[in-house]
Image (cartoon, rainbow, N blue to C red):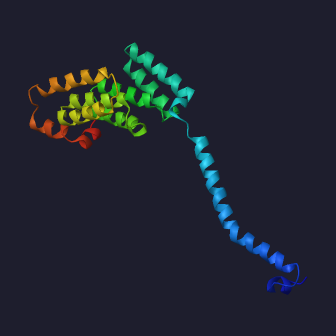
């Protein structure tokens, strides 16, 4: 069979070859697109792990940080937590622990950034929300602290003892004498708070 016969449709069996070639040309782009989609979906499924599968190295460093913090060595705890976070950036508990350490050191803006990191991974993380309320109260941002506390009350299903504690903390801070006007203005802006140390 000549080339011209194939191109023109030919006679006999060449019409079948032409139909096969047309079908291949029609469905090849669709097939390639589906293959690319399946490859992407399967690679995403392999690379993303659920929260329950945190890297064991990160968990080990987190335990080291907990031990250092319990013994009062805040600097060693901070270093261990940062290493744990580098080993697995999805470890929300480490974000919360780093926020707690920063708050303990009086670095409320830094604490808020760490709590926001945990909330970016899980917006309903009660420990991170509670830490945020405490950091905001420490900064004098009572109105914003109340908003976060209200969010916690909405999310709470059943017994939530930390809400009663935080409610008392916010009420106590609200009844305290007011801060000077410069600090009040800075405390009322959550974005400004997150940028401060």
Res. 131 image quadrant? top left
Residue lying at the far right in this picture: please name it: 1
Q: Residue at x 43, y 28 (%)?
A: 94
Q: Residue 91, percent across and down?
A: 47, 31
Q: Residue 158, percent across and down?
A: 34, 24
Determine whether, in the image, residue 89 is placed left or right of residue 190.
right
Q: Which residue is drawn at 30% across and 22% down?
A: 162
Res. 56 image quadrant? top right
Quarter holding the C terminus?
top left
Res. 46 image quadrant? top right
Q: Residue 150, percent across and down?
A: 25, 33
Q: Residue at x 35, y 29 (%)?
A: 126
**Vertical relation: 58 (above or below) 119:** above
Q: Residue 123, percent across and down?
A: 38, 37
**Vertical relation: 100 (above or below) 41:** above
Determine whether, in the image, residue 143 is placed left or right of residue 155.
left
Determine whether, in the image, residue 24 is placed left or right of residue 144.
right
Quarter holding the N terminus?
bottom right
- Total marks drawn? 0
Residues 137 and 101: in front is 137
């Amino acid at each position: 069979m000549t080339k011209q016969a194939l191109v023109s449709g030919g006679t006999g069996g060449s019409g079948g070859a032409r139909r096969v070639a047309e079908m291949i040309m029609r469905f090849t782009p669709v097939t390639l697109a589906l293959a690319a989609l399946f490859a992407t979906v399967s690679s995403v499924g392999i690379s993303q792990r659920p929260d329950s599968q945190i890297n064991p190295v990160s968990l080990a460093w987190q335990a080291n940080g907990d031990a250092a913090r319990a013994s009062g060595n805040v600097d060693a705890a901070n270093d261990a937590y940062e290493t744990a976070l580098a080993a697995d950036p999805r470890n929300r508990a480490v974000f919360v622990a780093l926020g707690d350490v920063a708050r303990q050191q009086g670095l409320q803006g830094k604490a808020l950034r760490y709590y926001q990191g945990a909330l970016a991974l899980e917006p309903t993380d009660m420990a991170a929300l509670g830490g945020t309320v405490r950091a905001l109260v420490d900064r004098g941002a009572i109105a914003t602290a109340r908003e976060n506390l209200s969010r916690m009350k909405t999310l709470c299903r059943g017994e939530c003892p930390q809400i009663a504690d935080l409610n008392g903390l916010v009420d106590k801070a609200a009844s305290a004498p007011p801060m000077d006007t410069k600090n009040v203005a800075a405390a009322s802006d959550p974005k400004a708070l997150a940028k401060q140390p």
